[in-house]
Amino acid sequence: MQPAGEAGGEGRGQGAELRCTDEGTGGSDAQEPCADSSAVRVVVGFRLTEKKARSFLQEDLLCHARARGIEFRRIDGSRPLASQGPFDVVIHKVRDSHGNSMDAWDRDLEAFAAANPQVHVVDSPAAIRRLSSRASMLQVLPCCLQLPQGIACIPRQLIVHADDALDATMEALVARAGLSLPLVAKPMLVDGSLSSHRLALVTEEQGLGALQAPLVLQEFYNHGGVLFKVNVVGQSVTVVERNSLPDLDGGDAERSWDSDEEAEGRSGSGGEDVVGEDAAVWEGGVTSVISPDERERRGVRLFERISSAYASEGKRRSGALAAVCAPPEDLVRKLAAELRERLGLQLFNFDLIRARQSPDRYYVIDINYFPGFSKLPDYHTIFTQFLLGLCAGERPPKCSDREQAIKRNECARRAAAAAVQTSRGLPVESQ
């Protein structure tokens, strides 16, 4: 395949090239020498934040890819994309510190993709933008989706903008929406920073007074304290089990967790509720969902992320928290394929929980674009195969034009209905 961009051998020399050495890092089972650059068959242009580039483009991936004829080249964001390359594939994840799209980059990339349809742009900026806000990320799914061996749902939720909180108290908004406690409060903005994953669990009505908008409130469902992260890389689907918020079985909800000292002892720096003095504003400029002067209010608890919540070991040993079976493989694959098509994305993961009271009911509670795939076992093989598959012409199965039109119309209808519900302070869900 002839990559797009500047043609000829000179074009191959453009951009900042990442080279791997013979000494792999990152714990690969088998170290393999890097292939000679003359064997390069696929050029992948990347524009990633520095943090993302360091975590994702590790030595194992670079060496494994180069041994198979794949070379990664950094894209210079200060220059037009058309003047760089040539590229077979472009991958990117760049958002400013407030989670907004990089408009100039998005326009440049979209123009480049239109002029070079043979280049695989992973993924469309418009599709990625949907996941930058929790007000829109789950709207691609219906309220309940029948799948093999189960039903996938989205939680009942309420979107609270800053202006909404000026006109009514949080208690009034929740009562008007008809949501039931306990509730999980999440930041509206998803910008890739740690702060966008920090959330609060509200177990009593008085705890609602500690919250500050903008945020999204989701009803909490007991799920055995286990969360399944489903990682999607093209057609590859990998499920990883993670800790989650423990079940709440009545009584004093605070007893569902260990003390702060016990949790911190097991989880390291990720176990504490509040880190540092500036608890209201975290990394990336995202405001906490809890007001800084309300951190001690009863009925609400702040977590760095869902996976930093640890259920009592005593409860686990006594069987109070039942073991949670992993979701059936067929269900997970069908759900991943459904989301891949509805989102129009190839690099993402989603958080899936299994309802304790209805074991055949699953909830998709969050979706993340291009997450930390480097934490996956054998991620360098998964991603290399994905890139080779793209350039070999492999595509995820597509619905017919009629089916796609029906889904587009349904998504448009849902978005319009959600806008009306939000304006009335109603929970956002499909009918």
Image (cartoon, helix red, strand yellow):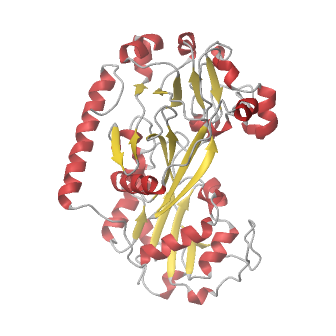
Residue 148 coordinates in the image, percent (x, y): 37, 52
**Residue in front for this viewpoint, 295 or 399:** 399
Dividing the picture into quarters, in which one does residue 50 lie? bottom right
Residue 200 coordinates in the image, percent (x, y): 59, 26
Q: Residue at x 64, y 26 (%)?
A: 302
In the rendered view, does 174 fall on the left or right side of 18? left
Q: Residue at x 63, y 45 (%)?
A: 242
In the picture, the quarter occupied by the C terminus is top left
**Residue in front for this viewpoint, 6 or 53:** 53
Residue 44 coordinates in the image, percent (x, y): 51, 72
Q: Residue at x 37, y 18 (%)?
A: 177
In the rendered view, does 168 fall on the left or right side of 315? left
In the picture, the quarter occupied by the N terminus is bottom left
User: Does residue 22 appear in this view?
Assistant: yes
In the rendered view, does 267 fall on the left or right side of 194? right
Dividing the picture into quarters, in which one does residue 16 lie? bottom right
* 30, above or below 206, in the image: below
* 419, above or below 24, in the image: above
